[in-house]
Image: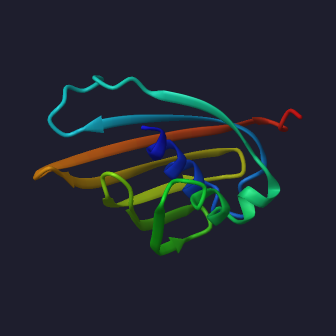
Amino acid sequence: MHKFLLLLVTTSAVAADIQPGNWEMTVTLSVAGTPAGAIAPVTQTRCLTQEDARDPSKLIGAGAGCEFTNKRDTGSELSFDVACTGQVPMRGKGVVQYSAQNVSGTLDLTAEAQGQKLQTSSKLTARRLGDCKS
């Protein structure tokens, strides 16, 4: 679950218009074949530095193990393909709408583990709370 959060957070930081600061981010994950609401949303607060907002590859390289391709940024929406390595490799697509103070998006991933196909859908909502605390 935290990999999904990191993945969405780093992707949302791509836009130069996103303001650095303290951000509250909530990810809601659903897995095909499980009842709606079976997985509780995860909320985290994270400090995005000026460098984080300008170069998200520094965050992506910090353990997520994901490569983003086919990035298309309109200035208020970013869409992309993603492939993640790890114990369970995943592939998928995402789209993130953003402004200086708010981010929302979706990420759909597919993985195969032990011959079983796993499909997940994550929703992100984020808002800037203010400056980072030292």
Task: Pick whichever, 113 or 55, lies toward us.
Answer: 113
Q: Is 120 on the left-hand or right-hand side of 26? A: left
What is the count of numbered marks? 0
Name the residue located 65 percent from the left edge and 62 percent from the top edge: 56
Identified at 19% across, 25% down, the residue is: 35
Residue 111 coordinates in the image, percent (x, y): 24, 54
Q: Is residue 35 left or right of residue 77?
A: left
One can see residue 17 in this view: no
Q: Nearer the viewer, residue 19 or 41?
A: 41
Q: Residue at x 46, y 45 (%)?
A: 3
Residue at x 32%, y 45% (from the top left corner):
121
Is 125 above or below relative to 75?
above
Residue 26 x, y percent position in the rendering: 53, 33
Which quadrant is home to the N terminus?
top left
Q: Nearer the viewer, residue 91 or 125?
A: 91
Residue extending farthest bottom? 70
Question: Is residue 55 in view from this perspective?
Answer: yes
- Residue 112 on image: x %, y %: 19, 54
User: The C terminus appears in which quarter of the rendering?
Assistant: top right
The colour scheme of the drawn protein is rainbow
Q: Nearer the viewer, residue 111 or 39?
A: 111
Residue at the far left: name it: 115
